[in-house]
Image: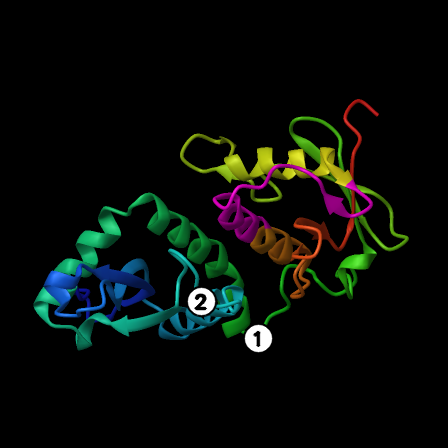
Amino acid sequence: MVRKNGQNRYIIFVSIPRSKPAESSGSPDGLEYYYDHIAIFATENKEKAHTIAELLTKDYEGGPGEDYPEGFIFKSEAEMSLQERVRANDQLSNLEDWALQMHEEAARYAEKAHMLVLSDVERNESSSRPDNWEQVSIDILDDDTVRYKIGKEEWKRANYAELDFKDNRKGLPNKLWGIFREMAKHNDGGFINMPTPLSVSKDIDRIRRILRQFFGVQELPIKYDRKVHAYHVNFNFTYKKNY
């Protein structure tokens, strides 16, 4: 609800495609699609809400697919009807698994958005950001840790949590971390020769977002090569467990 102290709250929504059966939509051609706005995040800072929505939209700029967000918007509670506010707050307190993922993405961007609003420097990025993915090297060292370097800089270490591969509900590595490690095992000259069912494409999208956020390179770090039916990594990627 709108804050009692007079400070308004802004709610970020994810716009997703939904479908209606032909009998309810009135369409003789089968399913009819429409867009539904699901509340995923709230903040009292209008500029921060705007910036988070922009960052999320840019991260999904590849376009919508199956269960894929169309875009992110924000709306003031003061502009909503009572019914809209009740529904939005109910969604915020009962996030589905996929909506929780969107909420966690927004939460990760909150600090970054705050820095952008203040025109601050983002996380000491001045000298440690690569120009492209070819400058990045990542080695899997064990079940929890990687080492990475940019160009000819010294190697640095990071664990799964620092890379943002943590399940925040359990404090353990999430499913994406396991897939990321398997990709390193099956990397052959930059091509990932491992079984990739259709369902894994969404996980690859999330791994891309994690890597782009950590290293600050907006180009895609992992691309799908239709000619060879395999994913291609644009950075140096090796599995050196117990090296």
Q: Is residue 53 left or right of residue 194?
A: left
Q: Is residue 205 magenta?
A: yes
* Nearer-the-camera pick, 94 or 3: 94
* Nearer-the-camera pick, 71 or 107: 71
Quick check: marks 2 and 1 in contact, CB under 8 Å? no
Relative to 140, say whether 164 is above or below: below
Secondary structure at badge 1 equals loop
Q: Amino acid at mark 2?
A: Ile
- Residue receiving disc 1: 119
**Magenta residues, as a range?**
188-207
Query: Looking at the image, is mark 2 or mark 1 earlier in the sequence?
Result: 2
Please report the residue visible at 39 percent of the width from the left and 68 percent of the height from the top: 70
Tell me, for residue 52, which label it has, or none.
2
Could you give the CA–CA distance between mark 2 and mark 1, rounded to whole angstroms? 14 Å
Residue 66 at what x, y percent from top left? 40, 57
Please report the residue visible at 64 percent of the width from the left and 68 percent of the height from the top: 121
Q: Mark 1 Cα within 10 Å, few/some/many (few <14, many 20+)? A: few
Q: Amino acid at mark 1?
A: Ser
- Specify the farthest residue to the front: 28
Residue 216 at what x, y percent from top left? 67, 61
Please report the residue visible at 34 percent of the width from the left and 51 percent of the height from the top: 99
Relative to 140, say whether 46 is above or below: below
Please report the residue visible at 64 percent of the width from the left and 59 percent of the height from the top: 123
* Nearer-the-camera pick, 139 or 204: 204
Quadrant the N terminus occupies: bottom left
Residue 16 at what x, y percent from top left? 33, 63
